[in-house]
Image (cartoon, rainbow, N blue to C red):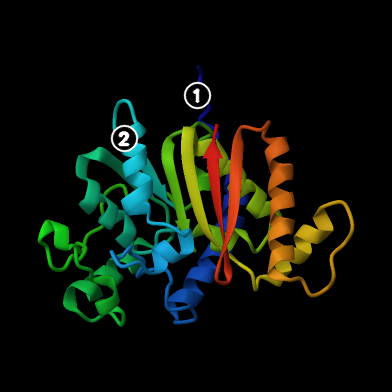
Amino acid sequence: MKISKEGFLAPEQLKTIYKICQNIARMCEQGDRPKYAFYHSIEAPEGGEINGFHGRSIIKDVIPSLIQRKQAGKVKIIDLGAGACLYTAQIREEFGDKVDVYSTGLRKKTAKKEREKIQAGESLDFEGIRYIIPHEGRVFWTPSKNLHPNDLKWRSVLELSKHPEFDLILDTNGELRSAVNNLDYLQKYLGAVITKLNPKGVASLAGVNLKHDNLFRQLSEELPGEKPEQDLTNEAKLELLNRFLSKLQQRENNSFNFETTLHNEFIQLTILKN
């Protein structure tokens, strides 16, 4: 099979996307971000932010299942919009040579500075990003100051080429957070995620904020049928997103299934590649 090396977007289109992402990243760096966000995301044994957004443990449940199912080679994973790549470091720490982990993100310099703060104990959330692994006898795990060569390798999934590569695609308020600002961008983002999944691959995408009214207004204008009331309930917003995904599923020739669930104020989307 001939593999296409064409990217999902032309260079000029990518520049527009990066501008949106850079603006959001800048706001985050200036402190305009919720506490769970971008540079302090790890999965703690007792649960927490990662588990809450995805509605399950990626480390305890999802990745072991993929490792068991994989017939040959490593499980290939990508974390989209990974911030300081704490979660990718944690996954490597847990699974070693059973996995091959990559990530996307905008600012290597900022990621490295955040890791230096963690090493020095100067991060505001330092206590929140250390965690205990009692079954392995280790007390605290703290990531290296240096990024792994596979981390922030690309700025966006839209920069990659159009052929399947990954068994697991993760996004925890990363690229998806930027994509929901524009419906056309969201379609391109989801199309890229679907394309990059290997057969039987899984994508767990978290961070569609139910307070993002502009997205749901765009969805109601885009989709045919009776228009919903001005003030949408959370259930109505979930239904709009499901209708949008069904339309996308038809466009992609039913190559995948999807599941959506509500977690607090967020919608988590799971894509299962056929």
For the C terminus, the image quarter is top right
Q: Measure the alpha-carbon separation of dots 2 and 1.
A: 28 Å
Q: Position of residue 6 (x, y in %)?
A: 55, 33
Residue depth check, mark 2 versus mark 1: number of the one nearer the observer: 2
Report crowding for label 1: few under 14, some 14 to 19, many 20 or more residues within 10 A (C-alpha): few
Quick one: label 2 or label 1, which is nearer the N terminus? Answer: 1
Q: Position of residue 270 (x, y in %)?
A: 54, 49
Residue 151 visible from this viewpoint: no
Q: Nearer the viewer, residue 153 or 41?
A: 41
- Disc 1 residue type? Ile
Q: Which mark is residue 53?
A: none
Look at 67% across and 35% down and name the residue there.
252
Report crowding for label 2: few under 14, some 14 to 19, many 20 or more residues within 10 A (C-alpha): few
Is 238 situated above or below 258?
Answer: below
Q: Nearer the viewer, residue 140 or 186?
A: 140
Look at 49% across and 81% down and name the residue there.
32
| Residue where numbered disc 1 is placed | 3
| Residue where numbered disc 2 is placed | 68
Q: Is residue 195 left or right of residue 187?
A: left
Q: Is residue 272 left or right of residue 145?
A: right
Tag 1 secondary structure = loop
